[in-house]
Image: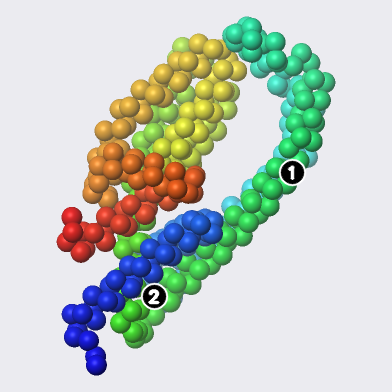
Amino acid sequence: MTPPLPALATRLSIASYILMGVGLVLVLHLHLLSALLAGLLVYSLVSALAPGLQRHLPGTRAHWVVVALIAVLIVGVLTLVIVAGIAFLNSERGNPTAMFERLMPLIDRARAQLPPIVVQNLPDNVEEIRAATIHWLREHAAQLQFAGKQAARVIVQLLIGIVLGAMLAIHRARAQAAGGPLTVVLNTRCANLVTGFRDVVFAQVKISAVNTVLTGIFLLIVLPIFGVNLPLAKTLVAVTFVVGLLPVIGNLISNTLIFIVGLSVSLGVAITALAYLVLIHKLEYFLNARIIGTQIRSRAWELLIAMLLMEALFGVPGLIAAPIYYAYLKRELEAAHLI
């Protein structure tokens, strides 16, 4: 006997929620988050950029053009990184001996700034630095080999995710039948996930841009006014924007790098930089709450709790996925009129 339509719709919705929940958990459990994020990013980019081209290119040609542009951009960036890496290693600056020699002035300046308990553990010359580096590499050879394998695995997952995202975007652009009832409700779940991802990414880009501007003003304008020229200042500004795309942990990474570079100048500069960064992050807390609240309609403390729980369950991948998962969950609850 065929169940009544409302009962069938309820069963289909429950089945789709279960399948989606299991899938999202498996993504973290099987360490496939990088592939998921890459796929969602490419899918969102193609879906957002293609409509503007469809006025000039009929059918799915606009989607193919956007996919081709993204592919060229990715290949170009990878090629540039590889060529730059090879050029750096072949240059005088990339020579390990020259790098060790450039470290000595930094260490000498640190001796006058750091406590004696730290100074006595610093190397006295280039040979000691070289010997300590070789000793550390030998002790951690297994971990470095594992890290290399993991990095290669992540790169492969990113490439597969990019290809899948592009294929799905083109597939969705083609006129076709809606599919079975379960397919329809699963498409709704996936659409909500894409929307949640897009909301979080756009919010985080805005937050990272604000943080980068404030950091750039301090490193490139304020410090030089007082006669302090921080090494690698422009690089630090660029890194601040890139890692700032990661919620919370990105700020920790950029702050740590800026503090370490500031320490190479003087302890006072490092402490001043750290105090400024903490201050602007406190001010950004209210701005972030407004930006995130506008995009995913949630308060900052809600997102922090979600990140804390996800980090406890799945580690760093859970911390990265928490904003997206939470935005998706909240969108589903709102669609069901439960909140």
Measured from the top left, where is residue 199 in percent x and y?
32, 53
In which quadrant is the N terminus drawn? bottom left
Q: How many C-alpha atoms fall within 10 Å of the one at disc 1: few (<14), some, or many (≥20)?
A: few
- The quarter of the picture where the C terminus appears is bottom left
Circles 1 and 2, Cβ within 8 Å, touching? The answer is: no
- Observer-nearest of 203 and 329: 329
Residue 300 position, x and y percent, is 28, 40
* Above or below for 233 versus 78: above
Q: Secondary structure at mark 2?
A: helix
Which amino acid lies under the numbered mark 1 shown in the image of this protein? Answer: Ala
Residue drawn at the location 79% of the way across and 30% of the way down: 135
Does residue 237 appear anywhere in the picture? no
Q: Determine whether, in the image, residue 157 is placed left or right of residue 52.
A: right
Residue named by callout 2: 172
Residue 54: horizontal and vertical position, in percent?
36, 72
Front residue of 217 and 8: 8
Q: Is residue 186 left or right of residue 117?
A: left
Q: Residue sitting at 24 percent across and 81 percent down? A: 8
Q: Disc 1 or disc 2, which is closer to the eye?
A: 1
* Quadrant of res 175: bottom left
Q: Taking 288 as reference, is 244 left or right?
A: right
298 is higher (above) or lower (below) than 274: below
Task: Inspect this view and state whether residue 321 appears.
Answer: yes
Residue in the image at 64% along x and 51% along y: 150
**Quadrant in the rendering for residue 285:** top left
Residue indicated by mark 1: 142
Mark 1 or mark 2, which has the lower sequence index?
1
The correct choice, above or below, for 2 with respect to 271 in the image is below
Q: Residue at x 57, y 27 (%)?
A: 232
Mark 1 residue element: helix
Q: CA distance from mark 1 to mark 2?
A: 44 Å
